[in-house]
């Protein structure tokens, strides 16, 4: 009998499938980690989904399931922080804050009329 040969494409697909299965199995944990950084359930889902997509785009071999899970958790943390930075940047653009003194008082007066 001949042994079945695995092509590089099949090997890549198998690694992506293994990563995706681990992401699905760990999804509650991934959400729990993202919630520590983000408040909105939509932002949490966005971060988790982005991390899963990123993880499947750049598969690599892992020595163990623990190593794979740690890598996925790191991806969720990175995406959560990235999403948090996006939100903070959008907030600064929407309502810029003054840097000091008299400008702060003038800004507070202006802000009361604009951002109510």
Image (cartoon, rainbow, N blue to C red):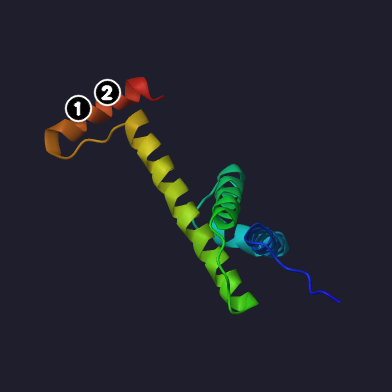
Report the side of 103 relative to 59 (left or right). left
Q: Measured along the vertical axis of the image, is residue 82 above or below residue 2?
A: above
Residue 89, quarter of picture: top left
Q: Secondary structure at mark 2?
A: helix
**In the visual, does 27 lie left or right of 2?**
left
Q: Position of residue 3 (x, y in %)?
A: 79, 74
Identify which residue, 114 or 58, lies in the foreground. Answer: 58
Mark 1–mark 2 distance (CA, rounded to whole Å): 6 Å
Give the residue drawn at x 62%, y 57%: 31
> Which residue is pictured at 31% across the width and 26% down the height?
111
Q: What residue is drawn where x is 73% and y is 68%?
A: 5
Indicate the quadrant containing the N terminus: top left, top right, bottom left or bottom right.
Answer: bottom right
Are discs 1 and 2 less than 8 Å apart at CB? yes
Residue extending furthest toward the left: 102
Q: Nearer the viewer, residue 11 or 114?
A: 11
User: Which label is found at residue 44?
Assistant: none
Q: Residue at x 29, y 32 (%)?
A: 96
Give how far across and how far down residue 44 sits, in percent.
58, 49
Number of on-image labels:
2
Nearer to me, 39 or 61: 61
Q: Position of residue 22 (x, y in %)?
A: 68, 65
Residue with the mark numbered 1 = 106
Q: Secondary structure at mark 1?
A: helix
Judge the density around disc 1: few (<14), some (14-19), many (≥20) Cα neighbours within 10 Å: few
Q: Which residue is mark 2?
A: 110
- Residue in the foreground of this view, choosing between 11 and 109: 11
């Amino acid at each position: 009998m001949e042994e079945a040969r695995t092509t590089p494409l099949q090997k890549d697909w198998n690694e992506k499938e293994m990563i995706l299965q681990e992401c699905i199995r760990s999804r509650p944990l991934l959400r729990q980690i993202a919630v520590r950084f983000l408040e909105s359930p939509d932002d949490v889902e966005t971060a988790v989904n982005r991390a899963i997509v990123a993880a499947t785009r750049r598969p690599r071999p892992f020595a163990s399931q623990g190593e794979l899970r740690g890598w996925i958790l790191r991806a969720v943390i990175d995406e959560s922080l990235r999403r948090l930075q996006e939100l903070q940047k959008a907030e600064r653009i929407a309502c810029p804050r003054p840097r000091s003194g008299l400008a702060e008082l003038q800004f507070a007066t202006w802000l009361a009329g604009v951002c109510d």
